[in-house]
Amino acid sequence: MVMRTKHRRISNRGRWVVPCLAAAFLSYFGFHAINGELGLNSKMQLDLRRERLTKELAGLVEQRKELERRTALLQDGTIEKDMLDEQARSLLEVARPDEIVIYRRP
């Protein structure tokens, strides 16, 4: 009586399945960690935008303070005659014949 045994040959492909899958997952998530919507590149762009908007906000705050200062002269119930005269002449671009007008840039 002869006893036969089956020998199964171990393939090299089986050993590479798990490392290949791991490399694929790491590549996918690594790419999106850098280039994705919430990745490192997006964070740098958001930081640059925040800096630009902060500078713009500082300029707007200064402009608002200037406007508040000028309107404060009008809010106490009496309009300052010189301020009203200056604004009217500036908007209408008129002057008396005996006046010299010097325009300044804001």
Image (cartoon, rainbow, N blue to C red):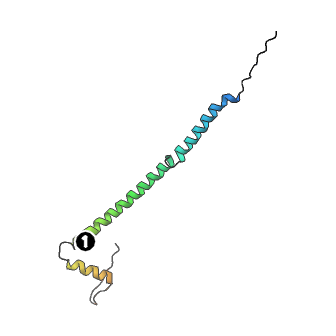
Q: Nearer the viewer, residue 94 or 38?
A: 38
Q: Which residue of the protein is positioned furthest toward the right in this rendering?
A: 1
Q: Which residue of the protein is positioned furthest toward the top in this rendering?
A: 1
Q: Nearer the viewer, residue 74 or 16?
A: 16
The x, y position of residue 89, in whole percent, is: 29, 83
The quadrant of the rendering that contains the C terminus is bottom left
Which residue is at 58% across, 42% downward? Answer: 28
The x, y position of residue 46, in whole percent, is: 45, 52
Q: Nearer the viewer, residue 62 or 71?
A: 71
Q: Name the element at disc 1.
A: helix
The quadrant of the rendering that contains the N terminus is top right
Q: Is residue 80 above or below residue 8?
A: below
Q: Which residue of the protein is positioned furthest toward the bottom in this rendering?
A: 97
Amino acid type assigned to the residue bearing label 1 in the image = Thr
* Image-based side of 52 in relation to 94, left or right: right
Residue 22, by quadrant, is top right
Number of marks drawn: 1
The x, y position of residue 59, in whole percent, is: 35, 62
Residue 88, by quadrant, is bottom left
Residue 67, by quadrant, is bottom left
* Image-based side of 16 in relation to 54, left or right: right
**Residue receiving disc 1:** 71
Q: Is residue 26 above or below residue 61?
A: above
Q: Which residue of the protein is positioned furthest toward the left in this rendering?
A: 77
* Image-based side of 26 in relation to 95, left or right: right
* Image-based side of 45 in relation to 96, left or right: right
The x, y position of residue 34, in whole percent, is: 53, 45
